[in-house]
Amino acid sequence: MDMKKSDIVLNKTAVETGSSVVVECDIIVPDVKPDLLKILQTDAVVALNKKEVIDGGYNVGGRVDFTVLYVPESAKGVCSLSASADFIDSENHPLTKSGMFMDAVADVEHLEFNLINSRKINIKAVVGIDTHIMEKLPLSIPIDMEGEDVMMKKERMCGLCRAVQKNDEIKLTDELTIPQGKPTIETLLKSDVALRNKEIKVIAGKIVAKGELSICSLYISEGDGMATSVENCLPFTEIIDAQGISEDNYNNIDFQVIKSSVNAIPDADGDLRMLDCDIKLGVSISSDEKVNEDIIADVYSTSKKLNINSNNIEVDTLTSNIDVSHTIKENVMPTEGIPPISHIYNVVAKPYISTGTSQYGKIMLEGVIDAYILYISSKEDSPVYNFKTEVPFSIVLDAPGALAGDKVRGKITINHISYNLNAAGEIELRMVLMVSAASFGKNTVNVISDISEEEFDQEDSPSIVLYFIQKGDTLWDIAKRYHTKEEYIRKLNNLEGEYLTEGMQILIPKA
């Protein structure tokens, strides 16, 4: 008996877990800067640069960049400090093997500091890491068999096969001008770089990425020594090679600022009215080809007894994939007792998804957006201040194909943010979110490896059988049990469709 097979490769989840690592460093005030009196703000940004799967474990590594704003001992003005700390998170796991694929994302979950003395700060960040590790599972699956007396039942097997796993970088450099009407820079305190208005288009073998970097800089102005801010925009369009990627694949393309150097430089007149920007974006690319194959799920013969060897194989299957824009508006009241707001320097928003669930045709994402509002105050001993507010969200997405109990992976990024201090003293926030969500099921398939046959004596079988339908019976099961054909049973009993009722009497003819 000849069995035709198709060789395919599918993804299978080996590990899906979360971990956390503490990243700590001491920041020493350099000799050229004054002593510390009071910390105004601490900030930390994490960037991953190592994702490695080994036999019996995996390593995730990266760097945390810290920025500190403080009031100097003179109690006038504001100063800044920066430092970086590398980290590695090594985890043991018995199911991992070298050569497996890893998807990992990280973010700062908690940040704290300890002012040791006027020249030293200890700062500590808790970095949360979500890890998904997959293996490629090669399968040889039966898709057809020869023989007039062979009856086959087929079913569609759906899965994913990792086609592209790649990390790349985009380097952006430019010299930006401080606009007219803004004071000249005396001391640049910090620059926050955020990716906004991102657009991704996948063409065969290439990724076209468009967007802009919002560069918000806080500085001490020349002459009056006041804190002020300026926002610049750096647009970009980049084409990234990614052989094997296709718009029909399930594509996951993440961008992350992994290096940002912004320095004040003089213009043609010698005034510090230019910003020299050297920024590096890390690009993490994964692309999974959608595999759909009609395979033989069951088989029997009307003339021979078949001995079937098979194994149940569980593979990952994509049930839905959505990318939408979602807008959240929120009015925030400043925390009671903080210095008065003169004007807002910047709002940094970080979305966190706490739960992702699926129902039939729907995906629900719930979580919170941590909004850090840094502003310039009219109070001399606190010229720069910040406070944090939490904006909860609950987003329901139409997700055709999603089923209850599917594993949901969601990602939310801030595509645009605007803010305004109204007459009532409230801060009006408007955040445009890019929401990506996918639901995954487990597809368990009975894969036939080989079949042997042996003769059985049909002369001992009756030419016709009276059968009473049992609960759960299908026409296929009955025909297989009595080595006949479904069409013979339908014709003899005038049956249409698969409708069978428990207790119903039918006649089963011999093949």
Image: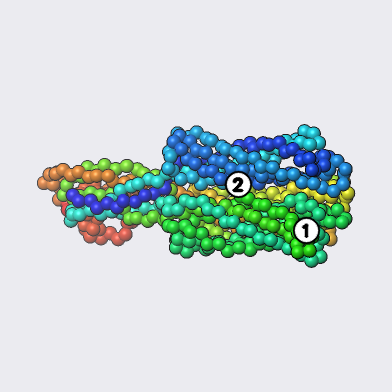
- Image quadrant assignment for residue 498: bottom left
Q: Where residue 17 sits in the image (x, y, percent)? A: 53, 40
Instruction: Write down the residue under mark 1.
Output: 272
Is residue 419 at all visible to an observer of this figure? no
Q: Residue visible at 20% across and 54% down? A: 146
Residue 409 in the figure: left or right of residue 351: left
Q: Residue visible at 79% across and 43% down? A: 32
Tag 1 or tag 2, which sits nearer the N-term? 2
Residue 142 in the figure: left or right of residue 161: left
Give the residue type at disc 2. Answer: Ala
Q: How is the image coloured?
A: rainbow
Q: Secondary structure at mark 2?
A: strand
Give the residue type at disc 1. Answer: Leu
Q: Residues within 10 Å of mark 1 (few under 14, many from 20)?
A: many
Instruction: Write down the residue under mark 2.
Output: 47
Q: Where residue 214 sits in the image (x, y, percent)? A: 68, 59
Q: Residues within 10 Å of mark 2 (few under 14, many from 20)?
A: many
Q: CA distance from mark 2 to mark 1?
A: 30 Å
Q: Secondary structure at mark 1?
A: strand
Residue in front for this viewpoint, 454 or 375: 375
Q: Residue visible at 80% across and 62% down? A: 182
Q: Where residue 139 sits in the image (x, y, percent)? A: 33, 47
Is residue 147 at all visible to an observer of this figure? yes
